[in-house]
C-alpha cells in the first residue's frame, strides 16, 4: 500500500494517505472524496560527504565521539 499526497478540492487541505488500490480515499478533515493526487517530494539520500561531515562536526561540538572508530577519534579535534 503506497502513501500518496492528496489535496482536497472541497476544503483545500493537504494530507498524506495510505491507500489500497481497491479503496476510494477520503479527506480526513471533511470526509469528501473529491481528492486530487499531488506529486510527492522525494526524501534526500543523506549519505553525501557534506551531510556526513556536518553531522560529525555537530557531534564533535557536543562531545559525542562514541560512533567514531579509533582512527577517526584521533583525527577529530
Image: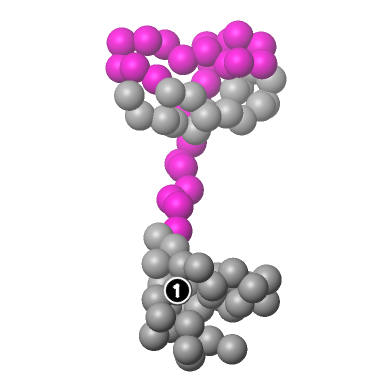
Relative to 37, residue 49 above or below:
below
- Indicate whether 72 appears above or below 22: below
Q: Is residue 31 visible?
A: yes
At which x and y percent is residue 30? 66, 11
Secondary structure of the residue carrying numbered label 1: loop
Residue 45's quadrant in the figure? Answer: bottom left
Identify the residue at image location x=44%, y=31%: 4
Quadrant in which the C terminus appears:
bottom right
Q: Which residue is mark 1?
A: 68
Q: Is 7 situated left or right of 43 in this image? A: right
Is 41 placed above or below 8 here? below
Q: Majority secondary structure of the magenta segment?
A: loop
Crowd band around label 1 with a 10 angstrom C-alpha radius: few (<14), some (14–19), many (20+): few
Q: Is residue 51 visible?
A: no
Judge whether residue 11 is colored magenta. no
Q: Check the image and report above or below for 38 versus 50.
A: above
Magenta span: 19-44
- The x and y percentages for residue 8 are 59, 23
Q: Residue at position x 60%, y 9% from top?
A: 31
Determine which quarter of the picture holds residue 21. Answer: top left
- In the image, 9 versus 15, the foreground residue is 15
**Residue 25 colored in magenta in the image:** yes
Give whichever of 17, 56 is nearer the camera.
Answer: 56
Q: Residue at x 40, y 76 (%)?
A: 69
* Side (left or right) of 38 relative to 19: right
Residue 68 at x, y percent in the picture: 45, 74
Identified at 48% across, 24% down, the residue is: 17
Image quarter in which the N terminus is found: top left
Q: Quadrant of residue 32?
A: top right
Amino acid at each position: 500500500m503506497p502513501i500518496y499526497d492528496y489535496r482536497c478540492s472541497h476544503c483545500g487541505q493537504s494530507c498524506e494517505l495510505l491507500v489500497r488500490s481497491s479503496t476510494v480515499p477520503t479527506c480526513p478533515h471533511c470526509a469528501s472524496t473529491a481528492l486530487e493526487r499531488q506529486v510527492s517530494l522525494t526524501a534526500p539520500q543523506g549519505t553525501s560527504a557534506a551531510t556526513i561531515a556536518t553531522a560529525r562536526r555537530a557531534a564533535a561540538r557536543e562531545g559525542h565521539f562514541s560512533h567514531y572508530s579509533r582512527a577517526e577519534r584521533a583525527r577529530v579535534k
